[in-house]
Each structure stands twice: as structure tokens, then as C-alpha cells.
Amino acid sequence: MRLDIVLHFCNMTQVGLKNDYNKETFTLKHKIDEQMFPCRFVKIVPLMSWGPSFNFSIWYIELHGIEDPDVVQPCLNWYSKYREQEAIRLCLKHFRQHNYTEAFESLQKKTRIALEHPMLTHLHDRLVLQGDFDACEELIDKAVRDGLFNQYISQQEYKPRWSQIIPKCNKGTSAQEINRDDVNKTVYLFGGWDGTQDLADFWAYSVQENQWACISRDTEKESGPSARSCHKMCIDSQRRQIYTLGRYLDSSVRNSKSLKSDFYRYDIDANTWTLLSEDTSADGGPKLVFDHQMCMDSEKHMIYTFGGRILTCNGSVEDSRTSEPQFSGLYAYHCQAGTWSVLREDSCNAGPEDVQSRIGHCMLFHTRNRCLYVFGGQRSKTYLNDFFSYDVDGDHVEIISDGTKKDSGMVPMTGFTQRATIDPELNEIHVLSGLSKDKDKREENVRNSFWIYDIARNNWSCVYKNDQAVKENPSKALQEEEPCPRFAHQLVYDEMHKVHYLFGGNPGKSCSPKMRLDDFWSLKLCRPSKEYLLRHCRYLIRKYRFEEKAQSEPLSALKYLQNDLSLTVDHTDPDETKEFQLLPSALFKSGSDFIPLGFSDVDQTYAQRTQLFDTLVNFFPDSMTPPKGNLVDLITL
């Protein structure tokens, strides 16, 4: 069941209830501007039942919170003052919009409550009252330079920009592993499967030189790891070291010796490999696994590994009749001491602190809040859709989502081809998702979609989706613009320059089952830049200035359109060009065509300038602007 929980003035949460009798607890919104507000009653609105034959039924509800009068009373006082202040600000906004100058000044003088930041008051004075458009442009320019538009930019949706990288050639692989060195702008690639055999070659790609360099054709000959696939690597950028663990072995070559889990470290500066352990399970670490995940904590010099299928001698891992599959738990490796510790064994989530091991999942380490984030994956034939974090310092598991909510359209589809990265600075998790769970691994259902999870807002958003099905001969145009859907590929992220790199994989062609890709792509997620917003605001100001001139000085307005307004238009953009070409029609409109709705009692020029001011205000931080609502909206019929 879907529920909406609200107070009379705000939405507190929207959640999904399981269809059972077990207790569930939800955290409600309880702060405004970092200040707790008091609450005695909430309104619960059922939105959706589990099915058409179900009725809404909630048997028991309990509201937990703080009841201490010493805590509640100050919050109650603040809340009462906050409501009164917001009511006055709504009145001030209404009075000014309708040019009730005396009422506005009298109320502001009496209450000493500011409607907005002084900078916006100055902007209103120059724009609405004086019509000094040049001064307005200067104020907007200063606001952009001072970073006042940053909050607006951070709230805009990303637009993906794929670019294929054409460096010197190398062979296509899948189930390979890549890592990036942000400081030296280098991407490292080791091993993988080329469709016929495991590889042991080791490559480095220089972003600056746009060139691959072969570090080693066979790392095993240089005291390094043997050829392998389905392994994992992590990089310590501070100490310039790379670690690799795990691999897949065919059942025909498994024996007690080959099933030992070797563990290697590569020193980038010295160009040498070091065998840290011949068998990590003998040292208290994980057994030989594949399709696991590894993360590096450079600050504490620790490595975390979680999940993966444990390889055994008793037949193929695909043969479920031989034995139940075994999965590896959560381990920590102390790099300096060279020791392993078990943080969580594999479990079936019997307790709140337990974790369920899996393969094909994503695990990321947030260097600022020092948490591991784990989501997705597969356990036996079950696709998992849960999402949890693990506090590495506090040894605490927090369930972000148990995967039972009926909102699959708002989260990445579970599948075997999810690849994820994290940006601690932006507090975001990025997920490139491919194979959908709905129709298993049919190639016509392989799709690309790119998702972003905002950690602070606990919110997923899809910024890119390619709904074109994979065909035997995909269009050339699609291949040139973006990578074709695939699995067994790798994705890494350059945190410093905010660029993703995608390499290789299996395109899933039934006619060429051994085909592997060697294409290399970069992905930049773009939001409106400061320069774009500055140009756009200038365009809005000059557009209105032109329309105002068109009513009284049409000839002067036409020259202004050609000489000044034209400079703020990107004439290479079809949409902007089309809008610009329609502007001369303002020369033939009557004055009544320009009166905004709801401003019929106000001077036309004042109303139009007020509307422009309200548009420009949207780019400023919420803490600086007038209230978003309008006084007339409070009137009920």
C-alpha cells in the first residue's frame, strides 16, 4: 500500500507498506530550516492498494517523538513565531505585487520583517520601480560571480553527453577490471575475457595524451597475477597502489591448489607486483570468489570486500543440483598490518544488522561520511532490489530501502549489468543500468539507463534512458552517438573532472556469442553553467525591454532587437533561434495582450516588470527570496 503522510502545511513523507502484519517504522520530516517543529496529529492518505481486489486497511498507528516539555515548548514558540512571520511576508509580497505602496511600507515598518534579501529589494527597485535595465544586468552579473546561482544549478536535471574516445587500439574484453587515478588522469585496465580465453595483460590509458600504453603483456611472467576474469581491483591514489582479488575458474580446472584465493598489490611508481597472500582464506579473509566488490579507504588504509560467489570443487557453479551456492560475506583488509577481519558473515537478513550476500551488486565507499553503500545484485535465481549503507567506523547497517516498494519506475531496475560510481563532493551515487529483470536475459531487453541517487534527499532520478531494443544490426547513428547496450563492461569515475569512462563488454548478440567490445567512451553529466544562466537572464531582461519599447517606440525597438537582444541568443541552438525569430510579432500586438493574469488592477508596465522580477528571483537561493506561495491561494471556495 502507498501512503501519503501530511500535516496541514507540508508533506512529511510518502511510503509503501508491506502486505503483512509485521511492524514498520518510517522517519517523518520534522524540521524547517534545521529547526524542529511540534506535531500532535498527522493526516494519512492512502494512495494505492496492493491490487484491485484489496481494500485499504491500516490496523494500528503509533507516533513516536520527543515529549519532554523543555524541548517541545521552545519548538512550539518558534513554530508560532514562524507561522506569523510567514503570514506577514505573504501579505508584504501581495501588497508589493499590486503596488499597494502605503500598506506595504506601513506593515514592514510596524513588524520590521524583511520580505527578502536586501540585494533582491535593490533589484526590485531598479527593475520594477525605475526600469533601469542596465543596472539590473549588473546586479545579475554580480550575483552569478558571487555564486548565488549555485543552489539553482545543483537542483537542475543532468543532461548526459556521451563522447567516443578513439585512442590507439587494443583488444575487446569483457569481465575485465578497470580503475582510475584521478591525480594523474590515468585509467588502468587488467585482464578480462576476450571471448576465447582469460587475459593477463595490463594497460594504462592517459587522458591527457589520449593513448593506451601496455604496462605488461603477461603479468604472471612479472611475478604478478595470472590470467583471469570476473576479478576486482581497487586503487589507493594516495600511495599509488593497485590491489586485485578474486577470479572465475571453469569447473574443469578446479582443484585444491587452483582454488586458492591469491591477493596481489601493484606499485605504480616502482612498476612491481607483490604477492600479499597465496590464499586469503587461510589468512582469515574470503575464499576464492568472483563477481564480488572491493572498495578502498585511503584515509584509514583499509580495503572492504563484500559478496561474490565462492568457487568450490564439486562441479559447475551453474549446476544447482550439486550443492547450494555459497556467497562471501563482508571483510576488511588492514593494508598496513596485512590482516583480514570478518565484519559480517553471509546471512538471510535474520536481524537488523545482518546483510545478505550476493553477486552482480554495486558497492561504493563515501569518503566523507565513511559509509559503504550496497544495492542490487543477484542471489541464486533471485534478483535483489534492496539498498543499504554500512558505517565502517560505527559498525552499523542502515536499510535505505528494502526493495519492496511498488515504485519500480522511480528506481533503477534490478539487473545483472548495473555499474555504479560515487561523488562524495556532490553527495551523489551514479548508476548505469542495462539488463532488465523482467524478461531475464533476452537480448531484446538490454537497455541503457543512467540514474542518480541524491544521498541527502534520498531521491532517485533518471537522467538518461535508451529505450531502443538491441537488434542484430544496430543503427550506425546510434553507435556514433552513444554506446550500445551491453553487459560485462566496466565504468569508472574521475571525481576531480566529473567524467565517467566506460570500456568494453558483451553486446549480447546471439549471432556472435563470443563477440567482445573494445570501444571506449566518456560521459559527462551537464547542468546549466553559470555563463549560460547569466546569458539567459540577460536575454529575459532584454526581451522584456524590447517588448516595452515595442509599445511606444517600434522603430527603436526593432534596432534594439537586432543589435542588443540578438547578442544574448545562441543562434546555433534551433529552439533559441526559433523563439528569437518570433519576437518581432510583439511590434504588432496591442497593450492588452501583455497584461499578466491576476494583475488587471495594476498598471500594465508595473505588472509586466513584476512578472519579470518573479522570474529572475527563481534563480536565487530560497533563503534570499520572498515566499513561494501567494496570499490569494489561501482563499477557499
Image (cartoon, rainbow, N blue to C red):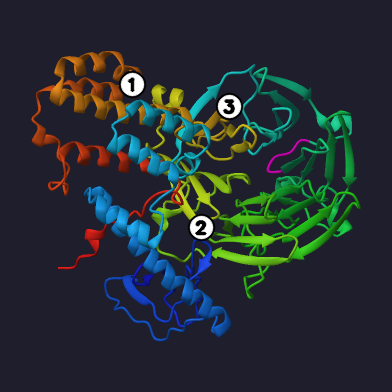
Q: Which residue is mark 3?
A: 520
**Residue 323 visible at all:** yes
Q: Residue at x 29, y 78 (%)?
A: 55
- How far across and how far down the image is residue 234, in percent? 74, 42
- How far across and how far down the image is residue 207, in percent? 66, 23
Mark 1 Cα-neighbour bin, 10 Å: few <14, some 14–19, many ≥20? some
Between residue 327 and residue 113, name the one nearer to us: 113
From mark 2 to mark 3, how far is it between C-alphas?
32 Å
Disc 3 secondary structure class: strand
- In the image, residue 465 sits, relative to residue 196, either above or below, namely below
Q: What secondary structure is the magenta-colored segment mainly?
A: loop
Sequence-first tag of 1 and 3: 3
Q: Residue at x 74, y 56 (%)?
A: 312
Front tag of 2 and 3:
2
Sequence-first tag of 1 and 2: 2
Between residue 4 and residue 405, name the one nearer to us: 4
Q: Residue at x 73, y 20 (%)?
A: 213
Residues at circles 1 and 2 in contact by the CB criterion of under 8 Å: no
Write down the region rendered in magenta.
227-231
Residues at circles 2 and 3 in contact by the CB criterion of under 8 Å: no
Residue 569: which numbered mark, if any?
Answer: 1
- In the image, residue 438 sits, relative to residue 514, either above or below, namely below
